[in-house]
Image (tube, rainbow, N blue to C red):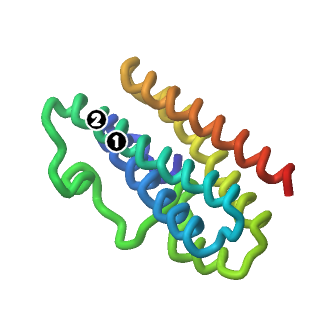
Amino acid sequence: MAWFPEGSDTPQLTAMAWLLEDGTGKFYAHACKHICREDAHRQLISMLESAEDAHKRRLMETCSTLMGREPREDFPKGIIEMPEEDYMEGGIKVAEALEWAQGRDIRDVLELMMALEANALDLYIRMSRRVDEDSAKVFVSIADEERQHLNRLGEALVGL
């Protein structure tokens, strides 16, 4: 929650969560194309990448509803200050994670992904406590999906 200052309003929280989902999706896309060698792992990571896109759509819709208007085309600009680099869930820079992942065993990469998903689960639970009831439902729903992602990654790790 360090990324989400205490005075942030719900649209700002939602926009920052969108940025982290976007960064995580970028990491998953790269990992799927350049790191994974087995089809089963590619399918899992591709599913995670798609889930990040779905989360982004829901977060943007939530933000739009909260603001009472469609977000700008360059969303989330105009709602939050944009960082110079892409960040993932957990506050990790995408570029640093990609550099770290190069040449790593798939077990290491899957464990990092589990850490990302665990952090996202925690984030959405905490966010649900800071927002109005309708927004909380969205965050709890995404938290449940993050929990499912953790389970899928755990199953993949057990299968190695």
Q: Which residue is under mark 2?
A: 61
Question: Residue 151 shows which numbered tag?
Answer: none
Which residue is at 52% across, 27% downward?
A: 140
- The amino acid sitting under disc 1 is Arg
Q: Residue 52, percent across and down?
A: 47, 48
Q: Nearer the viewer, residue 73 or 105?
A: 105
Q: Secondary structure at mark 2?
A: helix
- The amino acid sitting under disc 2 is Glu
Quadrant, the C terminus:
bottom right
Q: Secondary structure at mark 1?
A: helix
Up/down of 18 relative to 107, above or below: above
Q: Are circles 2 and 1 on residues that touch, CB within 8 Å?
A: yes
Crowdedness of circle 2 by 10 Å Cα count: few (<14), some, many (20+)? Answer: some
Question: Residue 57 shows which numbered tag?
Answer: 1
Residue 8 visible at all: no
Q: Nearer the viewer, residue 111 or 40?
A: 40
Which residue is at 49% across, 28% downward?
A: 128
Crowdedness of circle 1 by 10 Å Cα count: few (<14), some, many (20+)? Answer: few
Q: Nearer the viewer, residue 4 or 32?
A: 32
Q: Residue 48, percent across and down?
A: 56, 50
Which residue is at 42% across, 42% downward?
A: 54
The answer to whether residue 70 is left or right of residue 53 is: left
Up/down of 32 relative to 56, above or below: below
Q: CA distance from mark 2 to mark 1?
A: 6 Å
Up/down of 115 relative to 149, above or below: below
